[in-house]
Image (cartoon, helix red, strand yellow):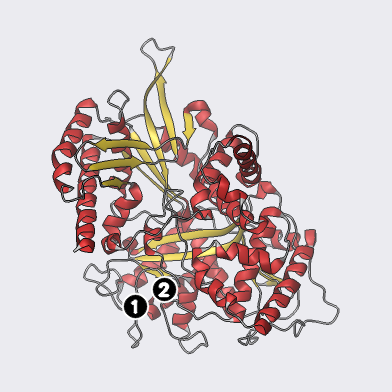
Amino acid sequence: MTQAQELTAEILAPPVAPAGPSDRQAIRQRLLDEVPALVEDLAVGDQMVVTLPLLRQADRDPESLAAPEEPFAWKPVFVRRSLGLAAIDACLQHRFSTPGEAVGPIADQAVVEWSRTGWRTFHWEPWMVGLSAAARSAALAEAATWATALWSSIDWRPFGRSIRLGGPDDQWVCPAARTVRLKGRCEARVALVTAGGDGISDQTQSTTLVSVASGIPASGWEAELGFLALVASLRSPTRPVPARVVGVWPDAGEHRSVDVTAATLAAAGDRVIACITAVMEARLTTVS
Amino acid sequence: MVVTDVEREDPKLRLADRVPAASPPNLAPGWTPLAGDALLDRLRVTGRPRPLADPERVARLRETIEAGLGDGSVGCVGGDGRPRVPGSPKPLVITKDRLTRALDRESRLGADLSGAQPPTLPMAGGALIDALFRQLVTTGSIGDPMRDAMDALVLDDRQGDLVAWIDNLSVTERGALTAEVDRQSIDLVNRWPSLDPSWLPRTQVPMRVGLAGGSIELSGRVDLAIGRPGLAVASVAIVEVKSGARRLEHRMDLHFYALLETLRSPAPPFAVATYYTRTGELDVEPVSDDLLASAARRTLAGIGAVCRPTGETVVSGPASRRPGKRNRIAADDSDRKGLVGNTVGRGQ
């Protein structure tokens, strides 16, 4: 079995004692109880958005939270994920054989579509259209390298139509005078399909979320992967709690996974609370 | 064994702090650079059997480094027995440049282990040629070389200081730099083969390996990798592009990259190569167990040299020219919060 096949088997493995609705309700209630008090010193109307990168930043480099936010400007590293995932998706649909072949035509198509209709599939179209050919090639190269690493890390054949790449972020808003929004972004969602009660039909019980990160897995990776499951499960009370989150670190050739249990959600909740606390301390330090 | 497309190698060749001369020195009479398919064949056919994936090899290489770290001989070992820079919770990031500087403190590269190197013309030429090489591999063409390369560098956070430095060059210096970049890029376009997409060519490939429970992080970024990784037989070749003259440490850099690829993949790369855009020389080295073992020992020695107190400031964390801390942390999963990148200052 190759490394890619191992990873695929891990993604598709049957759920192990997944968390249920009561676990979801428990962690939801805990966040509702604790979060509003943590952010009550925020300015009225201000809000906080907790993402996985922020969770990592608060844990590994809390001093940097006090640094002023850099103004956003598009650059190739910001484009690579969306363009790269679209390239892989095109390969899965047999439109191209490799992500490297796909990124150029997909970017071209997106720009043409935006020029024609004003519709932004990826948001970066106006930026891309203003680039010189060389700068555009740098953006394409970044996406091709990112996508090729992911493309090579997974055996995609067994997924069939059960995999969905990209898609909108999961979000959950903690209702309070000062809004705290949790945003979870994963690179793929894989439906775990099992035989239905009649033994014939298929039944989708839950999902595996796949998260791709740069660098190497650092301590605390379990709770960080769990954060994605937490947000996905809070987002909708009717959808099943994800059964598993698989993290892929292509730079390091590593993957890890967590089966989502009540303890996983609780640990992720701890990290969210710790993150909000650290961000508040940094903001208040900056203000004072 | 080094397979070269010229018959001699002069490790004493050193680049002065100037743009390389237009006429490459010391090339054998009548020698012509490889181009197109011949260049590709030299890269692909090493004359050696390709190594197989071997978990024991990986374990041995890790053991070489981690056991060496564990016996305390490298210094700066924390209370948990792991190497650690006092007062810093961050991993010690080891790059090829940091290794070389640590092992050769008397070298002209200086003794600053933080990786902060003042820009030079050769450094600028190297970064510009790297950008053009990436463009050529990605799109198959180069327009106005200097303008194209600068357009690409401007988008790279790691190169902000270098871009500003180039912008402030005198007309004469910039003219010389432009002339050399033009010359090398023309040769590059004429010689470098197009790569079949099925080989999965990828540029500026980041490689990271955590050691000793994450207290050490080996880090690299290779100019080009081809071949499908993760197979049972070595299928990846790594190519570094150099715009300056041959130097001995270029081979050591490649060995370090071979070690990283081996530690992060089931199989090692089957070959590592340096392509010299100034001359068209291609040095290809098949990857063997001896090469990897030697690279592991050198890496251990380098970590020790980085850690040993010398009166210099040893910093943990990345050896970055521009830290870009917020972006680095926020890198992982977001288009809008992306990785600023690896920390290796690119040289000639």
Query: How crowded is the residue under tag 1: few (<14 C-alpha within 10 Å), some, or many (20+)?
Result: some
Viewed as shown, does residue A230 lie left or right of A2? left
Name the residue beneath numbered marker 1.
B74
Q: Locate residue A151: give its quadrant.
A: top right
Whichever of labels 2 and 1 marks the residue nearer the N terminus, that label is 1
Q: What residue is drawn where x is 48% and y is 31%?
A: A163
Q: Are marks 2 and 1 in contact (CB under 8 Å)?
A: yes
Name the residue beneath numbered marker 2.
B300
Of residues B328 and A129, the one nearer the viewer is: A129
What amino acid type is highlighted by mark number 2? Leu
Q: Position of residue B7 (x, y in %)?
A: 75, 78
Q: Locate residue A26: give its quadrant.
A: top left
Q: Chain of mark 2?
A: B
**Which structural element holds mark 1?**
loop
**Quadrant holding the C terminus of chain A:** bottom left
What amino acid type is highlighted by mark number 1? Val
Q: Position of residue B153 (x, y in %)?
A: 58, 65
Query: How crowded is the residue under tag 2: few (<14 C-alpha within 10 Å), some, or many (20+)?
Result: many
